[in-house]
Amino acid sequence: MTTASKVLYASEPTLDIAEFRRVLVESGLGETRPVDDGARLEKMLSGANLVLTARLDVEGKPLLGVIRAMTDFAWVCYISELAVSQSAQGLGIGKGLMDEARRQLGPSVAISLISMPDAVGFYERIGMKRMPDAFWFGRKG
């Protein structure tokens, strides 16, 4: 990414599954997501009611990052993925996506997520509070 390049943040409810898969793999989240199950990835995207993207403003507008979330747009938003391609990590793309989520949701909507262990520092740096009382039923398959 060049210094003159601009990043475009937008709502993209019809994000292409192949682009979503590529960013999951390139971000490292592919290790914990069903990236080889196209039908499941399609359900994941179609079930989300907030999909935000970060694209480089050059020809082809390559996808750099994505947020996939579920929200009621009134009380809370759960972010199930915040993925940024490895080549764009450390450039502010993740923070930009979170800022865009907060902008679109407004100040009266809380945001929650479950962090991957190696991303905890990022969420703390952008000002998110660590919550001690989270619970989980694991999936089978």
Image: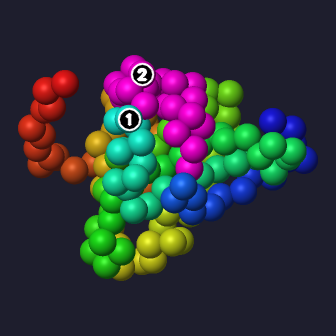
Foreground: disc 1 or disc 2? 1
Q: Is residue 52 left or right of residue 87?
A: left
Residue 117 numbered tag: none
Figure check: 51 above or below 115:
below
Q: Amino acid at mark 1?
A: Ala
Q: Is residue 5 visible?
A: yes
Image quarter of the C terminus = top left
| Residue 133 within the magenta-colored segment of the rendering | no
Badge 2: residue crowd in 10 Å (few <14, some 14–19, many ≥20):
few
Q: Secondary structure at mark 1?
A: helix
Locate residue 21, reporting x and y percent. Answer: 51, 32
Q: Is residue 98 visible?
A: no
Q: Is residue 26 left or right of residue 82?
A: right
Q: Residue furthest right?
A: 4
Q: Which residue is mark 2?
A: 36
Locate residue 4, reporting x and y percent. Answer: 90, 47
Q: Quarter of the image holding residue 48? A: bottom left
Figure check: 81 above or below 88:
below
For image coordinates 81% across by 43% down, the residue present is: 60
Snapshot colouring: rainbow
Q: Which residue is mark 1?
A: 39
Badge 1: residue crowd in 10 Å (few <14, some 14–19, many ≥20):
few
Of 38 and 78, which appears nearest the observer? 38
For image coordinates 52% across by 39% down, the residue present is: 17
Q: Is residue 132 left or right of residue 126?
A: left
Locate residue 52, reporting x and y percent. Answer: 54, 56
> Which secondary structure is most common in the magenta stretch?
helix
Which span of residues is magenta-colored?
15-38
For image coordinates 48% across by 67% down, the residue present is: 102
Mark 1 and mark 2: span between their CA atoms? 9 Å
